[in-house]
Image (tube, grey):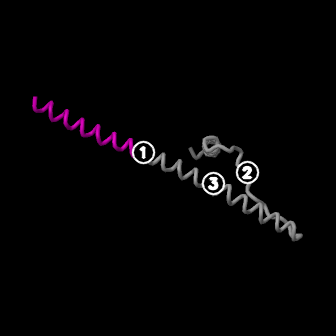
Amino acid sequence: MKREQLQTTLLKAFYDNESRRLNNCLEEIDHKLLDCSKYLEEYHRTRLALRTINERLSRLGAQTLPVADQLPADGLGEIINNRLQHFRSAGKL
């Protein structure tokens, strides 16, 4: 009986450890998604700033400079899906 108890204790400890690892993975995924949201906001702000600079250049008679394309989707979920498709088609996933 002691051997079975030891095995049970070890398996429960292993389960607890793996459960913590799983929770840590989910926390990291959540953290990365929040980071994506922040970078998306920064992307929009920076793109707007570049467009504003181009408008000023144009008013001064200078040639405008290329600005990164607008992302093909607005929502974070759509953007993440589009980027994942891009990585898959490029063989990165």
Label 3 vs label 1, nearer the camera: 3
What residue appears at the point 77 percent right and 66 percent down from the top-left corner? 53
Q: Which residues are magenta?
A: 1-25
What residue appears at the point 70 percent right and 48 percent down from the top-left corner? 71
On screen, residue 28 versus residue 18, left or right, reads: right
**Mark 3 to mark 1 CA distance (whole Å):** 25 Å
Query: Outermost residue toward the left?
Result: 2
Residue picked out by circle 1: 25
Which secondary structure dominates the residues rendered in magenta? helix
The percent position of residue 40, horizontal first and vertical second, equals 62, 52
Whether the magenta-drawn stretch holds residue 2 is answered as: yes
| Residue 70: assigned label | 2
The percent position of residue 6, horizontal first and vertical second, equals 15, 35
Task: Answer few, some or many: residues within 10 Å of disc 3's Cα (few below 14, many 20 plus, some between 14 and 19).
Answer: few
* Earlier-in-chain disc, 3 versus 1: 1
**Mark 2 to mark 1 CA distance (whole Å):** 31 Å
Residue picked out by circle 3: 41
Height in image: 35 above or below 1? below
Question: Residue 14 occupies which quadrant of the picture?
Answer: top left
Question: Residue 81 occupies which quadrant of the picture?
Answer: top right
- Find numbered disc 3 in the image and state the secondary structure of the residue it sits on: helix
Q: Are marks 2 and 3 in contact (CB under 8 Å)?
A: no
The type of residue carrying mark 2 is Gln
Task: Answer few, some or many: residues within 10 Å of disc 1's Cα (few below 14, many 20 plus, some between 14 and 19).
Answer: few
* Earlier-in-chain disc, 2 versus 1: 1
The type of residue carrying mark 3 is Glu
